[in-house]
């Protein structure tokens, strides 16, 4: 027996471990200083009452023989898929119910979807990037090429027809940069993918932060996407499901190549390697999309969006270049005075006890940049912005 | 872009669809006849009160900021892993906490574990077999060879040293045959695997049905298994979690080859492609292992075991050869009068309206055999046994 030696090619990403280590060392030396953490990508507000109520009801159903649920459909219950279908209708995207697959989160499906593709495909990922896109393909031994995301293109690289890619990752609003493609820009990617016979794996995990109408909530708002794109979305950020685990993947019927149909192939993969999302969780997820649920969720989103505004207002005030902050929970900014990402991390920690994430941890083009997130409490975010302003204006 | 054309090699398994079709056609022609279904592998008893209570409490925790849980550990919460560790202690297996990975079910991990192995490995599966073992390897393009399970070996094939296998699937108590390896027999498989540098993927999903002390609850009761085996288990059958989704995978630290460590490689895989099992579900799962939970679970298991006894007593009475029935929820028996599996299916449906699963659906050696399960209600099981006895003794 041999292991898959591709695992040897995956670098261990010590980014968050190193952040934790430096914060710990600082706090031990300076026990009197209050450290403010704005580095995390995890939500902090609890589940909303409509979801809690639905979860309790579903638990009660599981306690009685007549309403108990055993194995569910691999692709998710129709009661939830119908809610997701209606959600897409809200921004003008028409789907069939069986184009929607309920998942235990975008991360699982973004990794597992690779099962349906040939190992010979060339993968195009932006740099900087969510490390999962790279590592999942390294495991499979695929060739990876990079599209440079820099301050010159606003961290939104556009297609280059001299590059031949088979699988293209797009995350918009982007993690880690918070930058979002306009519909006009996305149309160029869709046209490129169709021209190159390529496929776009579209990570829409942060779509709920979009407010500007020129930005796309879904890649399927773009004409032609149905023949070249798969979309991954999650309830983690819209409804605080990071620990409750539910998302969905949209695969259009029209997505076909070489007599294989992506939708049917994925269903085959899921029915063989997955047994669906817990009934209880799917009931909670459906409540997110109810009228009451959406009202409650919007309050939470408004809270995080306000935090993002506090941070971006601060940077505007200081004249610092950044992406995100609007239409995104992430604010990605240029480190002042030509500092490297880690130099600035230490500078920030030492001088105002604010913790963020060094951009270099997301790829070479992240060097010299820094990420703050809107998922903390308003109180901490305000205090961090005040300290940051004082430091940057010094 | 090219799809993974290995998917073309996977046959569509129409077994349960065909069963449903024939039952539907019969019921439409004979609306007055009561059809008794003993074909399902799904549980029917609701979750026990201790689990329901824990689920409610966990939902309440998710409703408050101070107890809300976001992203959890990829490998599961220690509160659950500790319970699983203690459970293994009960049958004399000592584990480290980080040898236990909490999963969303044995099926997911049995499929996903293949990510850590080379594509060049030769896979040995018994025939008949749970179709997932075959299909997951076909997807990856691995060569599959078969070990014949027949009535001659009691559907428990033993190792053949002239065969070179890299990955060996063992399911004991077996799905679909209900046959269980003794510890003495398992030791032969462990010795074979260690001699051949092979790995055993041990599916212990039905271990909770084992009562005889000469049978193993875990492959790790066998000396030497820690250098050649990975064990997959599930709460689906022990606690009715088929729709609640929780299981666990045990990978010993000692399982190493070519400088790669299986435990560390799997953690790398999971941290990249998985974000853990819902907190709420893990809390419910931990309650299964509580004193109160175990008492309640045992009542449910006794109920199913009694159903299995009703079926096997009936077959004993009729002088029919079978495996399982004891130490297993499945009863696998020889179709009378040389009938094929599907002939007997139709004969049973026509003459006594009992529905089971044709053995031929699980592989060529299943031809001429038939599976009934103990997961129905006692009432239905009793009535089915009465009808079966009347027919077989005719």
Image (cartoon, coloured by chain):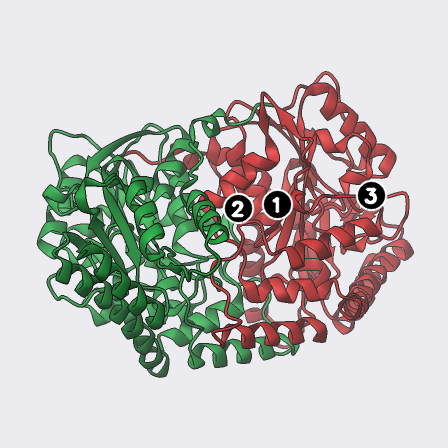
Chain colours: A green, B red
Position of A185 relative to A100 (above/below): above
Foreground disc of the pair 3, 2: 3
The residue that disc 2 covers is B13
Q: Residue at x 85, y 45 (%)?
A: B92
CB-based contact (under 8 Å), mark 1 and mark 3: no
Q: Secondary structure at mark 3?
A: loop
CB-based contact (under 8 Å), mark 1 and mark 2: yes
Q: Nearer the viewer, residue B381 or B82?
A: B82
3 and 2 marks on the same chain: yes
Marks 1 and 2, how far apart at CA: 8 Å
Q: Is any part of residue B6 visible from this angle?
A: yes
Q: Nearer the viewer, residue B162 or A12?
A: A12
- Quadrant for residue A369, please give it: top left
Horizontal arrangement in the rendering, residue B374 relative to residue A37 (left or right): right
The chain letter under disc 2 is: B
The crowd level at tag 3 (other Cα within 10 Å; few <14, some 14-19, many 20+) is many
Marks 1 and 3, how far apart at CA: 27 Å
Instruction: Return the disc, 1 or 2, that comes first in the chain's sequence.
Output: 2
């Amino acid at each position: 027996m041999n292991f898959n030696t591709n695992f040897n090619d995956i670098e261990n990403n010590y980014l968050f471990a190193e952040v934790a280590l430096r914060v710990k060392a600082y706090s031990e030396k300076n026990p009197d200083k209050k450290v403010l953490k704005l580095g995390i990508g995890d939500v902090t507000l609890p589940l909303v009452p409509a979801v809690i109520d639905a979860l309790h009801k579903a638990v009660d159903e599981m306690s009685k023989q007549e309403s108990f649920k055993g194995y569910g459909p691999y692709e998710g219950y129709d009661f939830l898929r119908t809610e997701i279908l209606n959600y897409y209708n809200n921004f003008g995207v028409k789907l069939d119910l069986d184009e929607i697959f309920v998942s235990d989160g975008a991360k699982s499906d973004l990794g597992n979807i690779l099962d349906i593709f040939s190992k010979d495909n060339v993968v195009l990922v932006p740099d900087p990037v969510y490390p999962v896109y790279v590592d999942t393909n390294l495991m499979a031994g695929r060739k990876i090429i990079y599209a440079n995301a820099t301050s010159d293109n606003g961290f939104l690289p556009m297609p280059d027809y001299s590059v031949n890619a088979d699988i293209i990752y797009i995350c918009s609003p982007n993690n880690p940069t918070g930058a979002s493609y306009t519909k006009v820009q996305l149309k160029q990617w869709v046209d490129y993918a169709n021209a190159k016979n390529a496929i776009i794996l579209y990570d829409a995990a942060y779509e709920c932060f979009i407010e500007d109408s020129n930005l796309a909530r879904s890649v399927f708002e773009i004409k032609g996407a149905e023949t070249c794109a798969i979309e991954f979305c999650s309830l983690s950020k819209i409804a605080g499901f990071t620990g409750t685990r539910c998302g969905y993947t949209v695969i259009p019927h029209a997505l076909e190549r070489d007599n294989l149909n992506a939708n049917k192939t994925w269903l085959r993969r899921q029915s063989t390697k997955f047994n669906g999302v817990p009934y209880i969780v799917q009931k909670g997820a459906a409540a997110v999309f109810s009228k009451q649920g959406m009202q409650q969720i919007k309050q939470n989103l408004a809270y995080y969006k306000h935090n993002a505004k506090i941070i971006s207002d601060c940077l505007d005030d200081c004249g610092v270049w950044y992406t995100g902050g609007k239409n995104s929970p992430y604010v990605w900014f240029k480190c002042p005075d030509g500092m490297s990402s880690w130099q600035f991390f230490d500078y920030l920690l030492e001088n105002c006890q604010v913790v963020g994430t060094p951009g270099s941890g997301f790829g070479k083009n992240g060097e010299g940049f820094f990420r703050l997130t809107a998922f903390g409490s308003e109180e901490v975010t305000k205090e961090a912005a005040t300290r940051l302003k004082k430091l940057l204006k010094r």
